[in-house]
Amino acid sequence: MITSRIGVDGSYNAAYGLDGIFRLSDDDYMLFNWAQTFENGNKNNPASLEPSRVRVSWERRTLKGLGFNLGYSRAGSEYDPGIGFELREDYSRLGNRIWLGWIPGEKSFLLNHQIFVDGFISTRNEDNSIESAVIGPGWLFSTKSGIGGQIAVKMYHESVLESFDFTDDIEVPPGEYTFYGLKG
């Protein structure tokens, strides 16, 4: 994929991306994504990670037994896709999910179910400090009638460097916040 934007003032933003899914065995897959951007005002070094975003993950795709989706991603300080937006900038992320799955017998109303632990940690590349983290166990199910769902208990941690507002009356000041939730 290649995109480019050129402004009437001579400014520009160009990006390219590559991705692939590689089957390693019957259930194991390696996913790889790479994107790099170039724009006026930056060093635009193609050998640098700063204008780049990379994601690598290893998945064991199974409903029965041990499965997982383990991933690492990183976006550099000069990565700017130009079209669209990014929720985070200049970060690294590690995480995803590990599970143990079962396929019950014919008499069960369940098609399959899993217990799992999932979560991630996102760090600031500048100083490797934690920006966000989430972890928790859960249970996921699918019924033979097509109904499915999950329930999970989560612990969240957020490190806020600058205050921000939800509304005119609600401001979140800088600080470290840890809280818990139930997700269904």
Image (cartoon, rainbow, N blue to C red):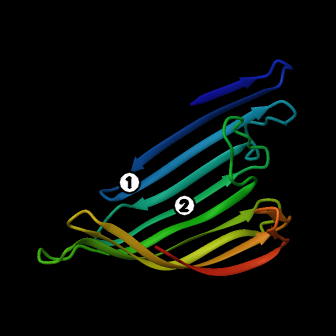
Residue in view at x 28 percent, y 71 percent: 64
Secondary structure beneath label 2: strand
Residue toward you, 144 or 124: 144
Q: Position of residue 135 (x, y in %)?
A: 57, 76
Mark seen at residue 71: 2
Q: In the rendered image, which quarter is residue 167 located in? A: bottom right
Give the residue at mark 1. Answer: 24
Tell me which label, 1 or 2, sits earlier in the chain: 1
Q: Is residue 108 left or right of residue 121?
A: left
Q: Is residue 159 left or right of residue 28?
A: right
Q: Is residue 56 left or right of residue 127?
A: left
Residue toward you, 40 or 83: 83
Residue in view at x 45 percent, y 72 percent: 98
81 versus 135 height, above or below: above
Q: State yes or no: discs 1 and 2 in contact (Cβ < 8 Å).
A: no
Residue in view at x 87 percent, y 33 percent: 41
User: Badge 1 local density, few (<14 within 10 Å), some, or many (20+)?
Assistant: few
Amino acid at dot 2:
Gly
Q: Position of residue 80 (x, y in %)?
A: 74, 41
